[in-house]
Image (spheres, rainbow, N blue to C red):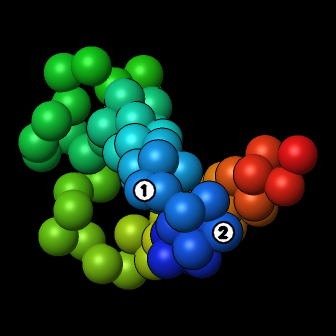
Amino acid sequence: MTADLTARAGTLGPAIAVHFVNNIVALLIFASPSSLSGLALYLLPYELSDVAQLRPWLLVDCAMMLVSWLVARLAIRR
């Protein structure tokens, strides 16, 4: 996804922005209680080692990346 943004924009700016937004959501909005949870608005009720509980969140993360990629493509087009 970020390679597509870099190719369309001709610069790394949109790819870095998508990466930054993804990290902000992962660290400042939702966080695991085991690490880096000091600034999070919502703590997940399970540890990162509990793979069965994290699978649905992986789908949410992928959907978030897809939406941010589409928004960035729309912004580049205009």
Q: Residue at x 21, y 57 (%)?
A: 47
Q: Residue at x 21, y 62 (%)?
A: 48
What crowding class fits label 2: few (fewer than 14 Cα within 10 Å), some (14-19), or many (20 or more)?
some
Quadrant into which the N terminus falls: bottom right
Please name the residue that numbered disc 2 is placed on.
Answer: 8
Give the vertical position of 36 relative to 61 (above or below): above
41 left or right, relative to 37: right
The amino acid type found where label 1 is placed reads Leu
What crowding class fits label 1: few (fewer than 14 Cα within 10 Å), some (14-19), or many (20 or more)?
some
Residue 69 place in picture, x, y as percent? 66, 61
Residue 71 place in picture, x, y as percent? 76, 51
Give the vertical position of 51 relative to 48 (above or below): below
3 left or right, relative to 68: left
Residue sitting nearer the eye, 35 or 16 = 16
Q: Secondary structure at mark 2?
A: helix
Q: Secondary structure at mark 1?
A: loop
The amino acid type found where label 2 is placed reads Arg
Furthest-front residue in this view: 10
The disc at residue 39 is none
62 left or right, relative to 55: right
Please name the residue that numbered disc 1 is placed on.
Answer: 12
Residue 55 place in picture, x, y as percent? 46, 77
